[in-house]
Image: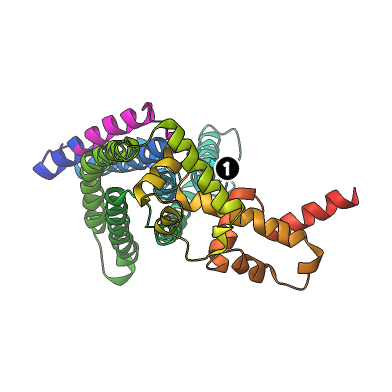
Amino acid sequence: MSLNLSLINLLILFGAIQGLLVSIILFFSKDENRLKSISLGIFVAVLVYNGFETFNWSSGINSYFFALFPFTLIFALGPSLYLYVYAIFYPQQKIPQPIIWYYAPVLIQFGLRCCLILYFILEKERFIEPGFSAQKIDHWQATIAEPFSVAIFWVYLVYTARLIRQKDSSEPLPTVYRWIKLLVLTMFVLGVVWIATVLSPFLWPTYNDNHYYPSEILLVILIYWISFAGYHRTKIVYLETVKAGSSSLDTLTPDEIAVCVQKMQEAMESEKLYLDPDLTVAKLADHISLNSRQVSSILNQHLQKGFSEFVNEYRVNEVKQRLLASENQHMTISGIALDCGFSSQATFQRVFKLLTQMTPKEFIQSESRKVKN
């Protein structure tokens, strides 16, 4: 075995080691937003594993270890990106589904590989009669798993882009918006390169898996970028946000803040400002004679909510009441949602499911069963 320690292989190795250290720091971080740290840690860990795997075959080591679970951890790349962005944009909200559902493809692929390895061992030790070739199954599974991993990545990438589009940009945190948009844009570039990598063997001859070099090098570059920019940038954003929020409230006493909270709640409960689909932080701030930054700071620091979450909770409660009212039986669910301040059916469905853990139809059926019982 001749070890190839070229400059590019050394960069891959050092990048993987650096990423490994960053992922460990993220996993053991004491950040209050654990979902953000863990999901970014898993995201980096996937890149790290891929970096070591690339160094393994590029340097000529060719350890069999990386052949045991091919196209397994890579399934976690898309879900981790989605959960990371979700945790930043909605730090106070629970994710719509249990976290295990997001990583189900990883677990399924891991289980299939374990079964195949077990079958290979039993077959080799002659505990069972060979009924089919484990090597052929290994080949076909890898052939199917690779494009499937790309498809899963693109599904979560699209959902992540939707999160960014749906987020109310009137709230502060412009720095984190720029960082997240740049990250997702980079992931789109990676997704295109990834598709080209998968399709290239079908379009022209390739040798020694050299068609993987562009995507592998791009992933290694991502390790450096995420390690330096991603980890440190989110820390800076967090400190900037806390500092900005604190300075916005420095001119208000605790009693004045309590009065402001009461005014915001009265504006929702008594005057029902949430029925306005065009309601913004600025409009609410003008209504209670504050500035937008102070309103956002009060919501974030004293109610632990973003503006969208604060308003949408009232809208969802209003929808729930109207869905159960007999005088509204002639109206569609979508019509009721729009009357309650939601700007679109898609936004309403997403928010309702997020806050109630059920769809509007499931809510109606659940309430009907309670009445019958």
Q: Name the residue rendered at 84%, 52% in the picture.
A: 369
Q: Name the residue rendered at 66%, 67% in the picture.
A: 336
Predominant secondary structure in magenta?
Answer: helix
Left or right of 45, for residue 232: left
Magenta segment: 15-35
Q: Secondary structure at mark 1?
A: loop
> On the image, which quarter does residue 327 sit in?
bottom right
Up/down of 307 relative to 252, above or below: below
Up/down of 188 relative to 366, above or below: below
Residue 215 lies in the magenta stretch? no
Residue furthest left as drawn:
7
Colour scheme used in the picture?
rainbow
| Type of the residue with mark 1 | Pro
Left or right of 368, for residue 110: left
Q: Name the residue rendered at 64%, 69% in the picture.
A: 334
On the image, the x and y values in percent for residue 55 come to 23, 41
Residue furthest bottom as drawn:
330
Residue 70 visible from this viewpoint: no
> On the image, which quarter does residue 211 sit in?
bottom left
On the image, the x and y values in percent for residue 370 come to 84, 49
Left or right of 152, for residue 21: left
Left or right of 321, for residue 34: left
Label 1, on which residue? 98
On the image, the x and y values in percent for residue 335 come to 65, 71
